[in-house]
Image (cartoon, helix red, strand yellow):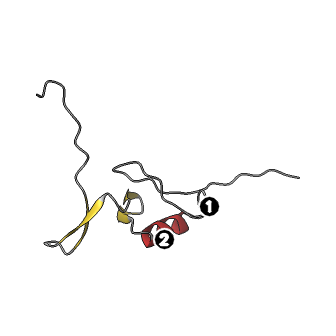
Amino acid sequence: MTLKSAPFYWLVCDRCGKRADYGENIAMSHAGDARDIAADSEWLITGHPTDEHHYCESCHVWDEEQDKSVPMPPARTTSEGNE
């Protein structure tokens, strides 16, 4: 038996860090499949292939003015010194 490895692909939400769900698979063998399956699961993919951004179904909302789905603002963090 020969053990081989190959590159595998999966998406991680740029806002919350959630990993895309590929059912019985942990990852996909082709980048396009990883994108397509995530997009079919209501993920938002923006940008160009060389500079993509990925947002899970919980991290984007419909913007009525722009008539499209847009990423939610980054999660707020508590600053030191605030009361």
Furthest toward the right, the residue is 1
Q: Is residue 26 above or below residue 67?
A: above
Q: CA distance from mark 1 to mark 2?
A: 14 Å
Question: Considering depth in this image, is 62 or 5 the residue closer to the camera?
Answer: 62
Q: Quadrant of residue 43?
A: bottom left
Q: Quadrant of residue 7?
A: bottom right
Query: Which residue occupies 37% across, 64% down?
Result: 45
Left or right of residue 38: residue 73: left
Left or right of residue 2: residue 80: left
Instruction: Residue 55: give x, y in percent of width and height.
Output: 36, 58
* Amino acid bearing label 2: Asp
Question: Considering depth in this image, is 69 or 4 the residue closer to the camera?
Answer: 69
Query: Which residue occupies 21% across, 34% down?
Result: 78
Instruction: Residue 62: give x, y in percent of width and height.
Output: 23, 69
Residue underneath mark 2: 36
Task: Characterize the local packing of mark 2: few (<14), some (14-19) or many (20 or more) Cα atoms within 10 angstroms.
Answer: few
Mark 1 or mark 2, which is nearer to you?
1
**Callouts 1 and 2 close, C-beta under 8 Å:** no
Query: Which residue occupies 43% across, 51% down?
Result: 18
Considering the numbered disc 2 on the image, is that residue within a helix, a strand or a loop? helix
Residue underneath mark 1: 25
